[in-house]
Image: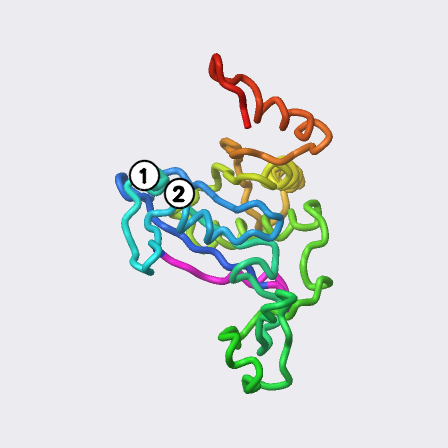
Amino acid sequence: MANSLSKLSENEHIFFWFFEARNMDPTEAPLTVWINGGPGSSSMIGLFQENGPCGVDINGNVYNNPYSWSNASNMLFIDQPTQTGFSYSIPVPGYLDPTSQNIVTLPDAVCPDYAVEFGTCGTYSYPNETLTADSTKNAAPNFWKTLQGFMGAFPQYSRNSFHFSSESYGGHYGPVFNEYIEQQNEKNISGAHQIKLNTVLIGNGWYDPLIQYQGELSFVYFPCPKGKQAN
């Protein structure tokens, strides 16, 4: 298990958490990359609530997840784009305003009296939208750079290929990110890893509202058990 930050540029730091495969030699196991949807949803949600090796219960106790994907694969959970989860641009002192849910930056590391009761004073990523991706297409290069950094630092776990997995807004991330990776491979960039895409897994993918909204009514009301009416 390892977690780290990949510095992509002066003000872009991407957080990832890696877990070795449990039930096979991790140097021979496949690599699966998980990113949550959102956009802007932390992949720590997927890690601790879905397919990671452990979870945290309502009392704060850590428990083993016997159904973790890490049983059969090396797992790399990435918080992206910048300012998502533990990925940050510029670290600043601040607090989370409970009314607006906005981060309020402070001139120094002293928590003001009126904010102490909020219990949210700490270090945050500077909430400036110009320091993160403003579209799915613009988020793709940093995802590619993150994989490049991981594969360069840990070649024993990657073997230059991976399985892409996501959910929800991953219906957009999947096609756009992996098309960008294939385009980068075609350029044969000196010193860059050729990243082979093995599979794309997207759970409950969000890809086209004009099509998907049309299916919501029939999804809710049909088919009904015989003799019963849906509420």
Identity of the residue furthest to the top in this view: 226
On the image, the x and y values in percent for residue 175 come to 63, 35
On the rendered structure, is 152 left or right of 219? left
Q: Name the residue: 54% across, 74% down.
A: 123
**Structure colour scheme:** rainbow
Dot 1 amino acid type: Tyr
Viewer-closest of 229 and 189: 229
Crowding at label 2, few (<14), some or many (≥20) Cα neighbours within 10 Å? some
Instruction: State yes or no: residue 96 in magenta.
Output: no
- Quarter holding the C terminus? top right
Q: Is residue 114 above or below residue 139?
A: below
On the image, the x and y values in percent for residue 37 come to 57, 45
SS category of the residue bearing label 2 = helix
Q: Is residue 156 above or below residue 85?
A: above
Q: Is residue 8 above or below residue 140?
A: below
Mark 2, residue position: 51
Q: Name the residue: 64% across, 38% down.
A: 172
Magenta extent = 2-12
On the image, the x and y values in percent for residue 79 come to 53, 54
Viewer-closest of 25 and 100: 100
Which label sits on residue 67? Answer: 1
Q: Does the residue at mark 1 contact the one at mark 2 (Cβ under 8 Å)? A: yes
Disc 1 or 2, which lies upstream in sequence?
Answer: 2
Q: Name the residue: 56% across, 19% down.
A: 222
Q: Is residue 158 above or below residue 2?
A: above
